[in-house]
Image: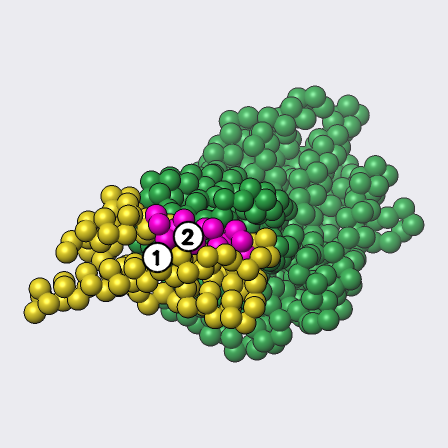
Chain colours: A yellow, B green
Amino acid sequence: MTLSDVYKTLNGNYDEAKTRMMNDSFLEKMLSKFIKDDSMKKLDEELKKGNIKEAFMAAHTLKGVAANFAFTQLFTQASLRTENLRNGKLPENMDELRKEYDLTINTINQYISEKRSEVL
Amino acid sequence: MNKSLGTIQEMVSFTGKRKVLIVEDNQLNIDILTGILEDEYTVLTATNGEEGLKVVMAHYRELSLIFLDVYMPVLDGFEFLKALYSREDIPFIPVIVTTSSNLQADEIKCLELGALEFVVKPYNRDIVKARTKNIISLRESVATLSAVEHDPLTGYLTIQAFQHYMTNYLISHSEEKYNLVVADIIGVRNINSIYGEKVGDDVIKFVSTVFRSFADTILCARKEDKFFFLCNGAFTADENTLRRAQKVIKDSSIVPNLDIKYGIYINVDTMQSVSVLCDRALFALDQIKSEPTVDYAIYDETIHSRVLKNILLESKFAEAVEKEEFALWFQPKISLSENRVVGAEALVRWITLNGEIISPGEFIPLFETDGYIQILDEYIFKKACLFQKERIDKGLKTVPVSVNLSRNSVYISDVAERYSRIVKEIGIPSDLISLEITESAANESREVLEQVKRLSEKGFKIDMDDFGTGYSSLSSLISMEFDGVKLDKSIIDKLKTDKGKKLIEYTIVLAHDIGMHVIAEGVEKKDQVEFLKKIKCDIAQGYYFYQPKNQKDFELLLDAQ
């Protein structure tokens, strides 16, 4: 699996991400940080507590991060929830966002583990 | 935004990179932006507005730009902007807002709060870099305009900026006690003329560095060869600090015998204007300027009253000239071979209309420092010419009168033209009036040499005054076009000893050999006169012959001859 495959699976824009991060190795490094990013977790937690304002901030952050990685699908999903929350509403179809997020994490994890076994 | 700008030197760090701050709560976004910027900039980070303000407080002098996220916990971007731009103690730092929001309302709000630009997440490398570069260069071109705030040589404030900030500081911290110190590098003018201006600059820079390491000051400024420091208690109350600084300066100076003098104003009166406070420290300094063994003076009541007295004298000066309170007195000069009056030195006496006599010792040094002496010199010169003219017109006997030309007057660029015009206008032969220039002034520079030459070309006879005081040297006798030399009273007093006799004898031989006549001043004793006669001194003046006389008595003396 290559980085290009990762972006194909996620329907993202590999070229854009690579340009932003200058090269594959920095992009790779950033991806390994992405899986540790807690914006999604925070969003879920704040929603559970019913904290709309804090949930908005988490969704907004996730949106920004997704945008920077050029994860187009995830960005679209995060944007929709962000706008719901901005207007003070509980987001609809959170499952779609979660599904997309999980797919993203899983794909990156797969890429990283394959990469690691190559090295070994 | 009425904010001051730092200097460009402060914005460029030692690595040559400018510093930017990223305020953003998401580490990933920080990392990505850092990745874009770190080749060209040193990047500082903070994860919310509150932390961001702390970083700003610690680094505002060096920060060129801030990248600001809008939505953050604790203190968001809006609040950060409000806080950043309302604080008077932080200079203006431009902000670029980073946003993934597509809401124009947010953008407008940020702009209203003072943000300059936006970059949208996802970041476009080229746009981020170009905007960063543009904003920094715009800011620095504005900063260049305000660079006069700082002295480029030392990085200290200019005196104007110093007084401006000091005023604000004293208003906002009026409950505390402050001292004001002015430090003066003695003889920078000499250093410049001996070693060149580059060395003079190096000396100033060196001294500024030493002070920086010693003095825990609130504000410091340089104006020419003087440094001003505003500090609270500790610095000046502690004499040792001054002494240690003095020692470091003397020990590691690049020129020998570097001397610094201090005027100190302890516990300044914050009700007075800042320029008055600076003046007071300067007054203290003035008291010791010509005392080689004293390093510092503290402003106190004595100085205060002396200053007031001086101000009073100065305020009376113009009126005194107008009312002709300055009178011409004459000290007769005696030819030792002919034993008769062959000339006189014109002296000034200040007798007010209500009969008060103000001693020359009081007003001459004062007028030498404030420049009034130039007016007084010319006034006395004119009076001496008029005196001669009157005697000529009356068909009475005349002898040459010499007038003192102070060092201030020597420095007037057209002094030769001015004085020769006076002689012509009044219409007396130029050999009836001569000039005396003190040796220390004569010794000073090429400038003085030039002036003496020009006066001489205008037909003035010039005597070197006060020979034997200060930095006298025999070489100064031959370096200039003087017609005569006046041996100071202090050297005449040396006639008591055999060595003193030899010194004077050989000085006279040398002077005669190079065509100068010799006048002995302050001659008070018979044995002095006899010795001077024996070694062929030409002329003498002093109490042994005559005390200074007023015009009427002097004329009686001339008429009787």
Residue bearing mark 1: A100
Q: Confirm whether residue B146 shows in the render.
A: no
Could you tell me which chain the residue with mark 1 belongs to? A
Front position in the image: B520 or B326: B326
Crowding at dot 2, Cα within 10 Å, few <14 / some 14-19 / many 20+, comes out as: many
For the stretch drawn in magenta, the main secondary structure is helix
Crowding at dot 1, Cα within 10 Å, few <14 / some 14-19 / many 20+, comes out as: some
Q: Is residue B359 magenta?
A: no
Residue type at numbered disc 1: Glu
Give the percent coordinates (x, y) of residue B163.
Answer: 64, 53
Front position in the image: B254 or B419: B254
Could you tell me which chain the residue with mark 2 belongs to? A
Q: Confirm whether residue B459 shows in the render.
A: yes
Which residue is depicted at the point 63% across and 64% down?
Answer: B180
In the rendered structure, are the residues bearing label 1 and label 2 in contact, judged by CB atoms less than 8 Å apart? yes
Q: Which residues are magenta?
A: A72-85
Residue type at numbered disc 2: Gln
Q: Is residue A31 left or right of residue B47?
A: left
Give the percent coordinates (x, y) of residue B6.
Answer: 51, 51
